[in-house]
Image (cartoon, rainbow, N blue to C red):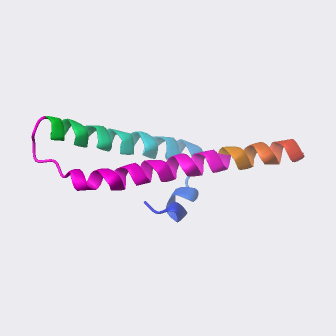
Amino acid sequence: MTSKELRKKPKEELQKALLEERQKLQDLHMKAAAAEDATLGTAPTIRRTIARILTIMSEQARDHGNKESTQ
């Protein structure tokens, strides 16, 4: 997911996407530990997506807080 796509989503959808990405990463680690066919090359991509989601969520929370304090 790109940052533009993520910024359009409401908070609830961002939280759901965050849980899904964390689950993907956990599954990937479990497959690697069990010596199954795991493509560890996708782990950095998943971690970056998680970081993007967390960044956008914190930006939205910060922006929402600033709007309330100015009113």
Asked if the magenta segment contains residue 45, the reply would be yes
4 up-or-down from 60: above or below: below
The quadrant of the picture occupied by the C terminus is: top right
Tell me what residue is drawn at x 12 percent, y 35 percent: 34
Total number of numbered discs in the rendering: 0
Note whether residue 10 is visible. no
Q: Position of residue 55 (x, y in %)?
A: 56, 50
Tell me what residue is drawn at x 45 percent, y 43 percent: 18
Asked if the magenta segment contains residue 33, the reply would be no
Q: Position of residue 51 (x, y in %)?
A: 48, 49
Q: Position of residue 57 (x, y in %)?
A: 59, 46
The front one of 56 and 40 is: 40
The front one of 19 and 47 is: 47
Note whether residue 42 is visible. yes
The front one of 19 and 9 is: 19
Q: Position of residue 23 (x, y in %)?
A: 33, 39
In this picture, residue 17 sits left or right of residue 58: left
In this picture, residue 48 sits left or right of residue 41: right
The quadrant of the picture occupied by the N terminus is: bottom left
In this picture, residue 59 sits left or right of residue 31: right
Tell me what residue is drawn at x 44 percent, y 48 percent: 50
40 up-or-down from 19: above or below: below
Q: Main secondary structure of the magenta part?
A: helix
Residue 58 picture quarter: top right
16 up-or-down from 7: above or below: above
Q: Which residues are magenta?
A: 34-60
